[in-house]
Structure formats: C-alpha cells, structure tokens
Image (tube, rainbow, N blue to C red):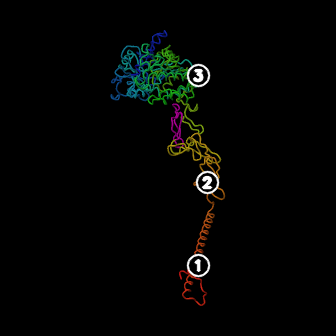
Amino acid sequence: MELTRLLHVVVVVSVVLLSAIGSCVARFVVEKNSLRVTSPEKIKGTYDSAIGNFGIPQYGGSMAGTVVYPKDNQKACKAFDEFGISFQSKPGSLPTFVLVDRGDCFFALKVWNVQKAGASAVLVADDMEEPLITMDTPEEDSSSARYIENITIPSALIQKTFGEALKKSISSGDMVNVNLDWREAVPHPDDRVEYELWSNSNDECGVKCDMLMEFLKDFKGAAQILEKGGYTQFTPHYITWYCPQAFTISKQCKSQCINHGRYCAPDPEQDFSSGYDGKDVVIENLRQLCVFRVANESNKAWLWWDYVTDFQIRCPMKEKKYNKECADEVIRSLGLDGKKIEKCMGDPNADADNPVLKEEQDAQVGKGSRGDVTILPTLVVNNRQYRGKLAKGAVLKAICSGFEETTEPAVCLSGDVETNECLDNNGGCWQDKAANLTACKDTFRGRVCECPLVDAVQFKGDGYTHCEASGPGRCTINNGGCWHKSQDGHSYSACLDIGDVKCQCPPGFKGDGVKSCEDVDECKEKKACQCPECSCKNTWGSYECTCSGDLLYMRDHDTCIAKTGTEVRSAWAAVWIILIGLAMAGGGAYLVYKYRLRSYMDSEIRAIMAQYMPLDSQNEVPNHVSEDCA
C-alpha cells in the first residue's frame, strides 16, 4: 500500500541524493539490543538481536527470563488458547520468553498471539541465513490495527543459527535463561539528549498516520517540559521525494510536487482526480518546518508541538479544512509571526531549490551510526533510530536512557509527567478575561480547547477563537455576551433569553446589541410626549413627560388627564347642573307658552260669545273678527 510505495521512493531518493553529494551508498541500519545467554554453559554468551518496530522495548533497562519453545503452533500464527497452551509465569519464577519461528504470518501477529498467552517477551528465529532485519508492522489494514496498537511486550529477531542452538538446548531438557538488555541501545554521552521526529502532516494515510497523530497529542506535554527545561534539543523533520526531470511537466508531477518537481509527496487519496494533492502535503510540511524555525528563533521551539496538534484537530482533511486559511488561524492563536513563516516558506512555484526542504533531503540520508530514514514515522534519539511503538511512556524511556548517568531530569525519575499549559498564553484557547472564563483545560496529555460549562449554562464554539453561552439561563453568564450598562441608578441589558435573536437593544436604545446600544432621544425624534399639554425631557434609556396645570400624563396613551377622582366628580356635577338648568328653563318656557296660549284662547271665546249674548256686567269686548265676516 502507500507505505510500501513510500519506502521504495524514499530509498531511491536517498540513493540519488547520496550520488549528488558524493557519499557512499545509502543504507538502512538495523537497531539492535544485546541478548546474553546465562545458561546452559554450552551456549552461554552474548548475541545480537534486532529490536522489533512495535511493542514496548525497555530502553535503558534489561529483562531476564526463561526461554520456551512451544510444541504446537510454533510459528504463532494462531491463538495459543486453541491448543490449550499458556505462558503465564508462576509466582516467584522468571518471566517467560517464547521462541517462535519466522514465516506464514506477520511478525506483529506472532507477538500478539504470544502476548495473549501470557508471555513477557518474544524471540523470533529467522528461517534463512541472512543479516538481521527489522521486524516492522504490516501494511495498514483495520484488522492488524486492532492488535498492533495493543502490543506491549518487547520482541527481537535472532539469526537462524542461534535459533537452532536454542531449540536444541530446550529439546534436550536444558533450562535456557537469557537476559535482554537495552541499556546500550541508545548512546548516553552527556546531560542533554538530542532527538528528532520524522513525520508527515498527511492525516489520511491509514493506521500509521492515526498512530502518529495520537502520539503527538499524548507526548506533547512531556516534550515541552523537557524542552523548556533545556534538557533536550528537539528537531522535527519531513520526508520528501523528487520527480525525475523527464516527468516534471506531467500532470502527476505538477499535482504532487512544488518547485518544478524538486519536492513531492504521494497523493493522500491515491486519486489524482479528486481530493487533496501531494503538493498540498508538501506545502503543509514546509509550513510546519518554518513554524519550528520561527518559534525556535524566539526561544520557544516547543510551540511546534502546539501547532501540529492544533492543526490536526482544527484542520483535518476529512473536513476539507487542510488549507492555508485554517493554518493561519492556528498560527495567530499561538501568537506566532505569520509573515516570518511565509518568508521562510518561500515561493513554491519558483524553479529553484527551497533551502528548507533541501536541508531536509540532505538530512534524510544516514550519517555516522544513524542509517537512512526509510520508515515513517521515525524517532531518532542521540543519532540512533528508536524501535518500538510510538507511545508516550515507551518514547520517554528511550529519551531518558540517553542522559548520562546521574544527570537525568526529575521527569525521568518519576512515574508521572504533568504541566499546566493553560498558564502560558491561555494555551492559545478562547478566554473572556472580564468574566474570568476560559476554554483551556489542562490534562495529563496536554491542554485541550473546549468551551466551558458554567452554572449549568453550556458555552458553544470551536474553543479556539470563540465560545458563547447557549440555552436557558445564558443571560446570567456575562449577559450572554451582549451589551449591558448601568448609569444613573438604572441597568439595562441587550440579552434575550428566548427566541432566535440573542442580543437586541432594549426599548429606549438603538445599536447592534453586542458591542453598543445608544440612548434614543424620544423628545427630539418625536416618538413620545406629543399631546398639546405635554412637556418632554429626555433621560438615559427613557424620557420624562409632564402636563400643564394639574393634569397627569398617561404614558400608555400619550395624553394628559386630571390628577384625582374628586376633580372628575366635580366636573360631572357641573355638567349635571347645567343640564338640569337647561331642563328647568325649558319647562318654564313651556308653562309660559301654555299660559299665554290659554289666555289668548279665552279672550277669543269671550269676544265671540259677546256678539250673540252680551252680558250686562261686561263691557263690550272688541271684536277681532273682520266686519266683512259679520
């Protein structure tokens, strides 16, 4: 799969580079530990064994045990419980080392089956006469990933001749005792350890990439303690290959390389028509190298660990965030100088060497006791390649074994490593200093940026650039991040606890509700107190309206009324008096009218009657009737 192809390419690159610089042929160095047979006498002595590139070698220490060779399942390709075999040591006895034969299945599977049966270490006897090789993990697949991650015992490959000698002694009834020794596996010349990690920013290359990303997060805290204390000098490295001159204008080289084919990486998805290209990986690898260089210039080289772990969390390929924009956000959150990093990276389109990546290709070739880097990831401690599982405890043992005796830092003498990364720049996480809130949480493995839960109110966000209170009760926490202010004995807040709108200026104010709300002048803008008898005065967040005379202002109706109920009753009494007066006047007028009408009728009747029967006592009444009518 990809790893196999990459290893082949890396070897080719190494050969080409060596030819270019006039050095010897490229080589792969097999890292060894010492295996000493203490009994029986006939095979007593010291032998070489190659450290397996999985499990946990006991760097800096040694382990004694008794070797057994199973009668069944001698290649250990099946689980030993199928044969009723257990290698669990009895109390008080030496640990059991199991000897198995090479062949038929992966090295790692053999060790896993032996570990499940209770053994403390595994010796794999080669099946051919050849120099020792490194037992590596198989090509990435989900089935092997499940057991590789859980292998915790050490393993070693021994040569065929030595393996046959062990088998012969065991079959003859001898107790074979051996001592596996890793104390000289890492040089330890002085009080400072120099180590480097060859890795890759590609997070979609399978099981090994997943293991690398997990290691970076786990080991970050310990690495930063060692670096800040001056106990170690760490340097990150990245493997690149180049495109042959004849193919630099091909579609494949253009998509996988920068600087006209000089620096390339395999396509992450192995699909040239979709997803990310190899050149995207090369550019991010280059950016991470420059992050280290810029951080190192400011004497904060340990910030590289923060960048690479934050980048893999915030900018993964599967979420389509593996890009410059996301990287720049991480750089800003850590307070690094983005312009210096860009300058360090140079122009990826230039038809010229990139000084940073050129140094990486040169460093890839082995020097001295260190062989070429051909396996990803690779850890190198004091110029010696580490073998074994990339796990925090195992790697820390390897690094600590690189200190001269009595010069080890305290972290190497304790069983725990802890640092509160939130104390430095708040860990690059979001924080609200005014409310004393932070998204930084310190853990044993390092800090994480996670929005907090405060008084049953959950903050939501990415934890790096923003967090905001969410749900019921959010306004009780720093006013929900909205505007609020107190003045003249009054307090106002723009926070709304319900609905989709979170921040809205309260009545009497205008603004965005988040950063500002300004007082509205209701008098000037004629939004209130507009009745004829009203007099308006603006106040902060409100207004005052008074009425002329003894009237009272009604805010809801924007009008003036009498102040008390007595005045209202007096007004109604006056109205009734007027009405009664009018009624009485009308009645009097009606009576006068009736009286005058009756008097007129009486006089007319008397006049008529006097014409026909005059009364003696009555003077002649004037006749109102016309003479013409007599």
Q: Which mark is residue 461?
A: none
Looking at the picture, how far across and down is residue 410, in whole percent?
Answer: 56, 27
- Please give the residue where the numbered disc 3 appears in the rendered image: 297
Mark 2 or mark 1: whose residue is earlier in sequence: 2
Residue lying farthest to the right in this orientation: 549
Spatial CA span between label 2 and label 1: 53 Å
Looking at the picture, how far across and down is residue 468, in whole percent?
Answer: 53, 39
Q: Which amino acid does the dot numbered 2 rest on? A: Cys
Q: For this rendering, which residue is in front, 409 or 178?
A: 409
Q: Which residues are magenta?
A: 442-469
Q: Which amino acid does the dot numbered 1 rest on? A: Tyr
- Please give the residue where the numbered disc 1 appears in the rendered image: 595
- Residue 412 appears in the picture as rendered: no
Where 576 falls versus 419 (above or below)?
below
- Residue 522 appears in the picture as rendered: yes
Looking at the picture, how far across and down is residue 525, in whole percent?
Answer: 61, 46
Q: For this rendering, which residue is in front, 230 or 278?
A: 278
Q: Which amino acid does the dot numbered 3 rest on? A: Glu
